[in-house]
Image (cartoon, grey):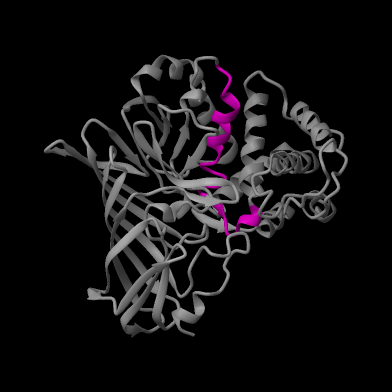
Amino acid sequence: MTGGENSTRIIDPYLPDNGNSGYRVSRYELDLEYKVATNRLSGTATITAVTLAALRTLTLDLSDALSVTKVAVNGARAGRFKTSANKLHITLAEGLPAGAAMTIVVRYGGSPRPLRTHWGDVGFEELTDGALVAGQPNGAPSWFPCDDQPSAKASIHIRIRTESSYYAIANGRLISRRAHAGMTTWTYEQPEPTSTYLVTLQIGRYDRHRVARNGVSIHAVLPDRLSENFASDFARQPQMMTLFVELFGPYPLADGYTVVITDDDLEIPLEAQGISIFGANHCAGRGRGERLIAHELAHQWFGNSVTVRRWQDIWLHEGFACYAEWLWSENSGGRSAEEWARHYHQRLADAPQDLLLADPGVQDLFDDRVYKRGALTLHVLRGRIGDDNFFALLRDWTQRYRHSTVVTDDFTGLASHYADQSLRALFEAWLYARALPALEPPP
């Protein structure tokens, strides 16, 4: 089967136009320049991959807002290339057999803009004075050519040049920072395999501060005007990290954790690999954001390291991160997880009973019921198998599938090894039936 035939296969029914077949990417190297005032992005993407089938043609996901000026594969100019419907179509000068190494170089540029989706605007977005990338679930093609499916993880190297008055942050470790002629080049390296939607770029008039280094280094990147608010609102973040390492296992990234606070307000915080992004409204000095802070931190284990292979299993991200909120509350002097479970069970009982947790559908992908019912599923499981087994299961889950991709059956199968009795009925009721089950009494 050739790449042209294979690339039409639907990889994820929730995003039928995303993802590409016929090859597997192992590394992205982005060498970019961004002008804030004109919202102009330009540069080169070098993509290292291996063919999974004999290829004469292939596709990459790339926004129509960006124009491609040159494509080369293994050093040879592509026979032809064109962009349409947010795809870059490439015809190779010579076909490649299955198992061949492939280096694709794409030179491109334009004025990036978010992609319009079922869930609103997603991807590269201008701020009042800067830019951000909010990639979940399919925003990566708004700023670089890629195989945009969560199951396709790769290492990432980002070199970004922008005006020297701005701070630029991307995933991974800052390798170098060099200023020249009013522009600064920032180079970041993320060696851990990363899904494309978790690759990010944040640009603003920010300063970087160390928050803690108690086993895992934590930094903040934010406008100076918000420093005092941050010190108040995010004060317990180091304690959250300590608790989550204890409950979930080792922090999955070598280069620590960074929180970015934008100078603009944001509707919701968002996660990226090794980074969480909050708006200025989440750092208002009123101490009301601990739930969100815990949620985004937990995603570094559940979602960013252990990532769904297909979007229908998103409860494995959001249910786990929501339950982490309850665990933080329980361990920091707030309501117990049992109290939160009873509270949200009543709220779900009053909501429509038309959602399948293991397959919520495109429109309900980010519905709050996915988050809360997912957390309730974990709480019921915890009650059934006991705390020792439950937290051993979570640590096994994060280690066994570290930097990998999973489906719901992977979790339910692993959970069965931590139970003395069958869990089939529990999972059937909570994951695969629409009616809300009764909340089991605590042991």
- Residue ID at (87%, 34%): 441
Give above or below for 295 relative to 406: above
Q: Is residue 437 magenta?
A: no
- Residue ID at (43%, 69%): 24
Residue 248 visible somewhere in the drawing? yes
Residue 261: give x, y in percent of width and height. Answer: 43, 28
Residue 126: give x, y in percent of width and height. Answer: 39, 39
Residue 281: give x, y in percent of width and height. Answer: 50, 23
Instruction: Name the residue nearer the viewer: 258 or 278.
Output: 278
Residue 194 visible somewhere in the drawing? no
Give above or below for 263 relative to 272: above
Give above or below for 394 relative to 263: below
Residue 21: give x, y in percent of width and height. Answer: 48, 72
- Quarter of the rendering occupied by the C terminus: top right
- Residue ID at (81%, 35%): 345
Give above or below for 168 relative to 95: above
Q: Bounds of the magenta span?
A: 287-313
Instruction: Name the residue nearer the viewer: 171 or 415.
Output: 171
